[in-house]
């Protein structure tokens, strides 16, 4: 996400937050501009719902959320039609790939109508 020019808000695991907090420390001392990656720590149930309902958040990945929390977050996210990626049982050792990382990427194109040019140089 960062490579495509987006920012990321990451909620650290409630049970094992140290890897995410270590990543935040590394990013804070790197060349990544401040605010590009935001790591939140605390109780997931308290952090996730306001984050899912926030109007400036465009998409949310519910990896790690149980069914009840995922349903609550989907409802909170529905107010501004943000994209939601539900957790899927995937064995990444069997089928490694980048599908989850690229789920929110969009390809923007500009459509230009073309037509035959007449003798006057204008299209019809």
Image: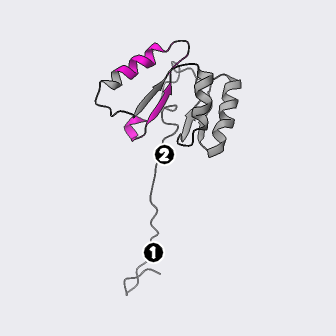
Q: Quarter-wise, where is residue 88 in the image?
A: top right
Query: What secondary structure is marked by label 2?
Result: loop
Q: Quarter-wise, where is residue 42 in the image?
A: top right
- Residue topped by disc 1: 115
> Residue at coordinates 44% horizontally, 66% vertically from top-left?
112
- Tell me if residue 81 is in the magenta stretch: no
> Residue at coordinates 65% horizontally, 32% vertically from top-left?
73
Q: CA distance from mark 2 to mark 1?
A: 28 Å
Query: What secondary structure is marked by label 1?
Result: loop
Query: Label 2: how many residues lie within 10 Å, few (<14), some (14-19) or many (20+)?
Result: few
- Viewer-side residue, 53 vs 111: 53
The range drawn in magenta is 1-25
Give the image location of residue 9, x and y in percent. 48, 31
- Tell me if residue 23 is in the magenta stretch: yes
Q: Quadrant of the N terminus?
A: top left
Q: Is residue 38 above or below residue 22?
A: below
- Number of numbered markers: 2
Query: Label 1: how many residues lie within 10 Å, few (<14), some (14-19) or many (20+)?
Result: few
In this rendering, position of residue 93 left or right of residue 5: right
- Viewer-side residue, 116 vs 48: 48
- Viewer-side residue, 68 vs 110: 68
- Residue topped by disc 2: 106
> Residue at coordinates 67% horizontally, 25% vertically from top-left?
69
Q: Earlier in the sequence, mark 2 or mark 1?
A: 2
Give the image location of residue 68, x and y in percent. 71, 25
Q: Is residue 31 above or below residue 23?
A: below
Give the image location of residue 28, x and y in percent. 34, 25
In this rendering, position of residue 90 left or right of residue 71: left
Give the image location of residue 33, x and y in percent. 33, 34
Residue lying furthest bottom: 120
- Viewer-side residue, 69 vs 89: 69
């Amino acid at each position: 996400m960062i490579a495509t020019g987006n920012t990321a808000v990451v909620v650290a695991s409630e049970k094992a937050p140290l890897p995410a907090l270590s990543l935040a420390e590394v990013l804070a001392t790197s060349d990544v501009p401040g605010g590009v990656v935001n790591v939140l720590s605390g109780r997931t149930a308290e952090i996730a719902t306001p984050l899912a309902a926030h109007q400036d958040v465009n998409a949310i990945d519910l990896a790690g959320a149980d069914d009840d929390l995922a349903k609550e977050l989907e409802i909170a996210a529905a107010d501004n039609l943000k994209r939601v990626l539900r957790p899927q049982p995937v064995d990444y050792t069997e089928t490694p790939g980048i599908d989850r990382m690229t789920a929110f990427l969009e390809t923007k194109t500009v459509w230009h109508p073309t037509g035959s040019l007449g003798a006057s140089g204008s299209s019809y």
